[in-house]
Image (tube, rainbow, N blue to C red):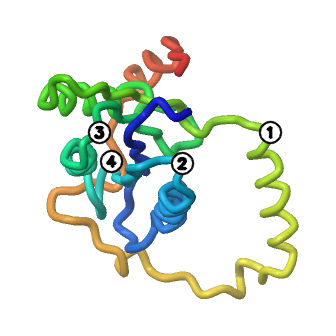
Amino acid sequence: MNQFDAVILMGHGSRVPDAGKGMEMVAERLLGDGTFKIVETCYMERLGARFADALGKCVEQGAKSVLLLPYFLHTGLHTRVDIPMMMRREAKKHEGIKVVFGNNLGFDELLVELVRKRIYESAHLKDVREIDIKERDDFPLGRNEHVFVPMHQDEAEHFKDHKHEH
């Protein structure tokens, strides 16, 4: 039996509209098959709902235990620091609600099969020199937004040296 009243899938976010459509479709399936009563999606940045909004919706619908599943393959800075810190800040606003930081997608044998499937599906695709590619300017950044999160090399080394299992 499911121990969570609500599940939130969190993606990175993008300035490209519908970039998170695949994750949103997964959320729709999880909700539609009845396994979970409440399923929401949110994003760390750019377009789409934020964690505070998704958590608020879950609480409004009566959730007492909420799992956030980071829809990320890698265990980088976002999954090790940024997301859990953001969650902690928001959880303090909802006393009595259990808020759990779930495992990221990471490695799984199912992922190996998915990669194999994508390789075979790609057999009919055109050479990259023959495809239409939009310009970056077609997807403008918002005011005061940066393309990359700035980080000095010594700061990156610190996180590399302090591995976190999650």
Q: Which residue is mark 2?
A: 35
Picture disc at residue 44? 4
Task: Give amino acid for label 4.
Answer: Met
Q: 64 or 104, which lies in front?
A: 64
Q: Specify whether 35 is left or right of 149.
A: right
Q: Which mark is residue 63?
A: 3
Q: Which mark is residue 109?
A: 1
Nearest the viewer among 124 and 23 is 23
Mark 1–mark 2 contact, CB under 8 Å? Answer: no
Residue 121: x, y in percent? 82, 71
Q: Of 25 and 161, which appears nearest the observer?
A: 25
Frontmost of labels 1 and 2 is 2
Image coordinates of residue 138 in percent, x first then y, are 37, 81
Disc 3 secondary structure class: loop
Q: Secondary structure at mark 2?
A: loop
Which mark is in front, 4 or 1?
A: 1
Identity of the amino acid at label 3?
A: Ala
From mark 3 to mark 4, how far is it between C-alphas? 22 Å
Q: Few, some or many C-alpha atoms within 10 Å of disc 2 (few <14, some 14-19, many ≥20)?
A: few
Q: Amino acid at mark 2?
A: Thr
Gap between marks 2 and 4 measured at Cα:
25 Å
